[in-house]
Image: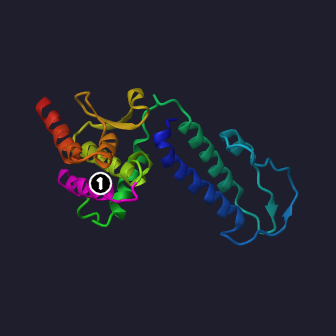
Amino acid sequence: MSHPMMWVFAVLIVLAMGGVALLAAGRGEPMAPAYDDRPDALVPADRPVRADDLRRVRFSLAVRGYRMTEVDALLTRLAAEMERTAAPASVPAPATLVRLVAEKWAAEHPAGADILDFSAESVDQVESSLDQWSRQPERGLAVDESDVWAAGAYLGEVLVRAVPGACWSQQVAYDGVPVVEMPSGRLANPLGRAMERFDGDEADSVIAFVRAALAAEQRVV
């Protein structure tokens, strides 16, 4: 699993672990004293949690109890997610997750979903946003800015939705960062271009990037 996508999966793991905690705690209220009806396999605190830790963990039952099948199912699913994220970079990109990141960013952007509608015209707003962010005095590097990653995911989704047969892919040459594979076989790197625009200048225009990618596929057709 490459470093660039770790932030996406870290959010998912945190959310899932939070759901387990809420279920076990009875929606935030303290649990009643637990009965020692079976030994617990505790999650280790001295190292990162692994998938096999989650498969072994067991919660004690309290008077109020909890629905064991739901918690066990969530733990099983989380363990499977962790195993998938630890797979080599040659595994196909999690297209659904990239799409969710793009859709969430578009929905929460001040411009609103009416403007950020995943059309080619909406890329103007992405260009404007990247330009504004890059001018902020407290800005960091693009690789550390989650909004820049999300903007790149949005650009990729514009291409995927505009070109039939285009899809997200993970390539070793791109260090596991998701890229868009066009029907012609061309690879477009929208996340990389969003970072270049943020770290660079107008010469790295994301508008020109999207237009060129679309035009290249039209010439093939």
- What span is colored magenta in the figure? 117-139
Indicate whether residue 122 is drawn in magenta: yes
**Front one among 205 and 161:** 205
Question: For residue 220, which quarter of the picture?
Answer: top left
Q: Is residue 184 left or right of residue 51?
A: left
Indicate whether residue 134 is drawn in magenta: yes
**Front one among 214 and 45:** 45
| Residue 217 point in image, percent of width and height | 17, 34
| Residue 89 point in image, percent of width and height | 47, 31
Q: Quadrant of the C terminus?
A: top left
| Residue 21 point in image, percent of width and height | 67, 60
Q: Is residue 60 left or right of residue 130?
A: right
Residue pictured at 62% horizontal, 51% vertical? 74
Q: Which residue is mark 1?
A: 130
* Label 1 environment density (alpha carbons within 10 Å; few <14, some 14–19, many ≥20): many
Helix, strand or loop at disc 1? helix
Residue pictured at 33% horizontal, 57% vertical? 133
Residue pictured at 17% horizontal, 38% vertical? 212
What count of labels does the image hold? 1
Q: Residue furthest left?
A: 219
**Front one among 146 and 66:** 146
Vertically, is 85 above or below 73? above
Q: Is residue 120 left or right of residue 39?
A: left
Q: Residue type at mark 1?
A: Leu
Q: Main secondary structure of the magenta part?
A: helix
| Residue 29 point in image, percent of width and height | 71, 72
